[in-house]
């Protein structure tokens, strides 16, 4: 086992894949494993949905994740909460600290700025374009990924945006904060139950850049011990304790 905290023992890795810019990806991240999402070239945003892989009726809840933790911007030591008050993922490591629960996902309308910046309007030669003049967006990517999992439009809920920060004005308006992942940044997500992760590697919808800058993302899954009763994330605050108690009770019912 490596003594370097950010290095992963190759013997523990079960999956290692590069997700191209503009692409979607889905995978079941099993309890007892951790998913590292890394931005080797930096990132302008990665949109994420999460579901209980054993019962997809339960899924990530953006409002509860922000409300319970008194913070709309996630970082190391924080949790992804489901709409049933249980814990999907714990953030066990994070070099970026820029993860937005409020901004939503890109779509054809928000991507119009890229067509305006393309003199031909075709995206010709660009692998992030769909060949019809429209650059790939997270709304369509989510639909494509969910269809392959026997889910659909009704299952798209407010998503999480990794690797980007937005600003919230006193009147509630959201704006781009010009804070994004730098080359080499990553986040480690420890699965606290079996989680279906759906990911769209498209820029954040509030990114003002007229250039479509979707960089590749690396996804690594490796075996890690399940959290113990004295785990510092489990015991970090009363809300976390309750979330894990709810999760443990649910997992006990499945045994």
Image (cartoon, rainbow, N blue to C red):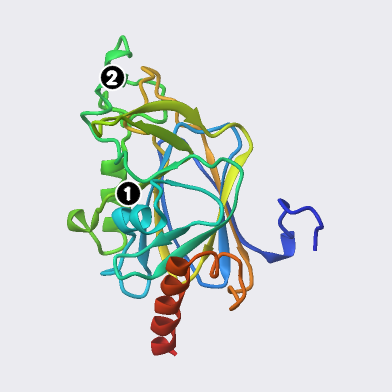
Write the residue at 73% across / 65% down: 11
Q: Residues within 10 Å of mark 1 (few under 14, many from 20)?
A: many
Q: Say whether disc 2 or disc 1 marks the residue closer to the N-terminus.
A: 2
**SS type, badge 1:** loop
* Secondary structure type for disc 2: helix
Q: Quadrant of the C terminus?
A: bottom left
Q: Nearer the viewer, residue 75 or 236?
A: 236
> Which quadrant is the N terminus positioned in?
bottom right
> Which label number is shown at residue 113?
2
Image spot of residue 25 (x, y percent): 42, 50
Look at the picture and state if 208 lies above or below 46: above
> What is the number of callouts on the image?
2
Residue occupied by mark 1: 159
- Residue 122: quarter of image: top left
Query: Along the horizontal axis of the image, is 85 left or right of 3?
Result: left
Q: Tell which of 174 and 189 is nearer to you.
A: 174
Label annotation for residue 59: none
**What is the quadrant of residue 108 in the picture?**
top left
Residue 164, relative to residue 186: is it above or below?
Answer: above
- Confirm whether residue 203 shows in the render: no
Q: Nearer the viewer, residue 41 or 19?
A: 41
**Residue 242 horizontal side relative to residue 18, left or right:** left
Single out the residue that lies furthest toward the left: 154
Say left or right for 227 vs 78.
Answer: right
Alpha carbon separation for disc pair 2 and 1:
22 Å
The image quadrant of residue 175 is top left
Place of residue 48 in the rendered image (x, y in percent of width and height, measured from the top left) = 39, 49
Residue at point 69% right, 65% down? 12
Instruction: Tell me, yes or no, if residue 115 can be seen here.
Output: yes
| Residue 128 left/right relative to 150 | right
């Amino acid at each position: 086992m490596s003594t370097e905290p950010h290095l992963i023992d190759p013997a523990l890795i079960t999956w290692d894949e590069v997700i191209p810019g503009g692409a979607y990806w889905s995978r079941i991240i099993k309890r007892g494993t951790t998913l590292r999402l890394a931005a080797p070239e930096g990132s302008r945003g990665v949109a994420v949905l999460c579901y209980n892989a054993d019962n997809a009726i339960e899924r990530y809840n953006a409002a509860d994740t922000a409300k319970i933790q008194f913070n709309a911007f996630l970082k190391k030591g924080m949790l992804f909460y489901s709409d049933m008050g249980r814990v999907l993922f714990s953030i066990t490591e994070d070099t970026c600290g820029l993860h937005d629960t409020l901004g939503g996902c890109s779509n054809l309308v928000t991507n119009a700025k890229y067509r305006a910046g393309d003199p031909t309007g075709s995206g010709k030669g660009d692998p992030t374009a769909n060949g019809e003049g429209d650059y790939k967006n997270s709304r369509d990517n989510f639909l494509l990924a969910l269809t392959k999992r026997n889910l659909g439009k009704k299952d798209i809920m407010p998503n999480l945006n990794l690797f980007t920060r937005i600003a919230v004005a006193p009147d509630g308006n959201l704006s781009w904060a010009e804070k994004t992942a730098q080359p080499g940044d990553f986040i480690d997500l420890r699965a606290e139950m079996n989680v279906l992760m759906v990911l769209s590697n498209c820029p954040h919808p509030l990114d003002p850049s007229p250039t479509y800058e979707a960089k590749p993302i690396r996804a690594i899954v490796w075996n890690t011990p399940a959290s113990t009763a004295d785990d510092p994330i489990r015991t970090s605050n009363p809300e976390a304790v309750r979330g894990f108690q709810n999760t443990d009770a649910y997992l006990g019912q499945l045994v």
